[in-house]
Amino acid sequence: MKLTKASEYGILTLLYLAKQPEGQLSDTASIAEVERIPLSFLIKLVPALVKAGLIRSHRGANGGLELGRSAESVTLRQVIEATEGEIAVNDCTASAPFECFRMGCAVHIALKYAQDQFLKALDECTLASLAKQEQLASVHFEVTTAR
């Protein structure tokens, strides 16, 4: 399973917004430039993030984007599901009704377990924790390059 660029860019966009001071609005062009996201792609991605409640969009001359809720409450799973839809390893592990004549087979059990572990890891990772990790990595990089 490989995430699409939409998920990658969605995560980068939300992480950018999480690192901004509360109440500060950011324009899509700045986000695109800093995060190296094609602007046309970002413009198409924003409505999905707004619809999911992950960001708020303000129109007008002084408009821009901001997080829709606290960075502590936004998980990687929420971002990925906003851009990709439900995360499922295969059809029989998805929540949508699927007629599998082998329900309960060893393969289903193994894949469901793997999916559950993956989703748990995504649920435990918040924008706030990612922002903190980036900050620590940046400080470490600055210390090691200053020597």
Image (cartoon, rainbow, N blue to C red):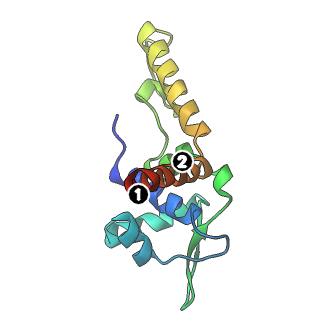
Q: Secondary structure at mark 2?
A: helix
Count neighbours of disc 2 (C-alpha within 10 A) and say few if under 14, some if 14 to 19, many if 20 or more.
few
The quarter of the picture where residue 23 lies is: bottom right
Q: Is residue 119 above or below residue 114?
A: below
Residue occupying the point 67% across, 60% down? 69
Q: How far across and how far down the image is residue 38, in percent?
A: 31, 68
- Residue pointed to by mark 2: 133
- Residue pointed to by mark 1: 146
Q: Is residue 111 above or below residue 18?
A: above
The quarter of the picture where residue 60 lies is: bottom right
Q: How far across and how far down the image is residue 141, in percent?
A: 43, 52
- Residue 117's label in the rendered image is none
Amino acid type, residue under disc 2 in the picture? Gln
Camera-nearest residue between 88 and 127: 127
Q: How far across and how far down the image is residue 82, in percent?
A: 51, 52
Camera-nearest residue between 13 and 104: 13
Which quadrant, please, contains the N terminus? top left
Mark 1 or 2, nearer chain start: 2
Mark nearer the viewer, 1 or 2: 1
Amino acid type, residue under disc 1 in the picture? Ala
Q: Secondary structure at mark 1?
A: helix
Q: How far across and how far down the image is residue 64, in percent?
A: 54, 79
Residue occupying the point 38% across, 54% down? 145
The quarter of the picture where residue 70 lies is: bottom right
Report whether 6 appears left or right of 81. left
Label 1 vs label 2: CA separation? 20 Å
Report whether 111 appears left or right of 23. left
- Is residue 50 visible in the rendered structure shown here? no
